[in-house]
Image (spheres, rainbow, N blue to C red):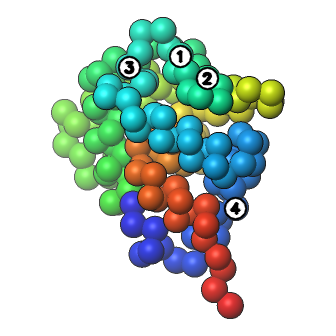
Amino acid sequence: MNFNALDNSVKQAMHEELLQYANQLGGMNFFLQLIESIKAEKVNPLLKQSSTFHYPKGKITWNKMIYKPTLTALFTALKKEDKQGDMLQGTNPKEYKKIMNMMKTLKPLEISIEPEELEPLSFLVLDTSQEKKTKISFLFKVIFFYNIGFAKQVLTYKKEA
């Protein structure tokens, strides 16, 4: 996702949302360290059989093991959602079935970030707040898929006067 190409109101909303999450996890620096720890791993931490990832200031746990085909389908759907706004729009039947299976698998998946000495933060991977429109959680995308530069841009965004 290209942050600079977004509308200012969208940028501001993203900034406020991500800043709120960062503050819940100990501040901007701790949040960025968390993302850097995840990016430093050779294999995506979500594929760990223990469903736990330890980082210097705490740990991340999730309630269900994720397999590589599901993660690959999620990554493909995420790219499509970022480009077109909907992960199911314009898919052929075979792709549609893969995406629907991935969504069924990940719907109950909850991720909990447990920083040392702070309250844990839990969120669902799939955002089903709008009826008939399932999206991938913004926090999940920022932590596990987008590059660290994107997170820095969002967190340091200043509203233009």
Callout 3 secondary element: helix
Q: Earlier in the sequence, mark 3 or mark 2?
A: 3
Residue named by callout 3: 47
Q: Is residue 153 above or below residue 5?
A: above
Q: Earlier in the sequence, mark 1 or mark 4?
A: 4
Q: Earlier in the sequence, mark 2 or mark 4?
A: 4
- Give the residue type at disc 2: Lys
Q: Position of residue 16 (x, y in %)?
A: 70, 61
Q: Earlier in the sequence, mark 4 or mark 3?
A: 4
Asked if residue 54 lies left or right of residue 146, the reply is: right
3D distance between C-alphas at marks 2 and 1: 7 Å
Residue drawn at (24%, 46%) of the image: 91
Furthest residue in direction top, as rendered: 50
Callout 4 secondary element: helix
- Give the residue type at disc 4: Glu
3D distance between C-alphas at marks 3 and 1: 10 Å
3D distance between C-alphas at marks 1 and 4: 28 Å
Q: Is residue 156 above or below residue 146?
A: below
> Which image quarter holds the C terminus?
bottom right
Q: Count neighbours of disc 4 (C-alpha within 10 A) and say few if under 14, some if 14 to 19, many if 20 or more.
A: some
Q: Is residue 145 above or below residue 69?
A: below
- Dividing the picture into quadrants, the one containing residue 33 is top right
Q: Which mark is residue 16?
A: 4
Callout 1 secondary element: strand
Q: Which mark is residue 59?
A: 2
Q: Which mark is residue 52?
A: 1
Q: Position of residue 39 (x, y in %)?
A: 41, 38
Front position among marks 1 and 4? 1
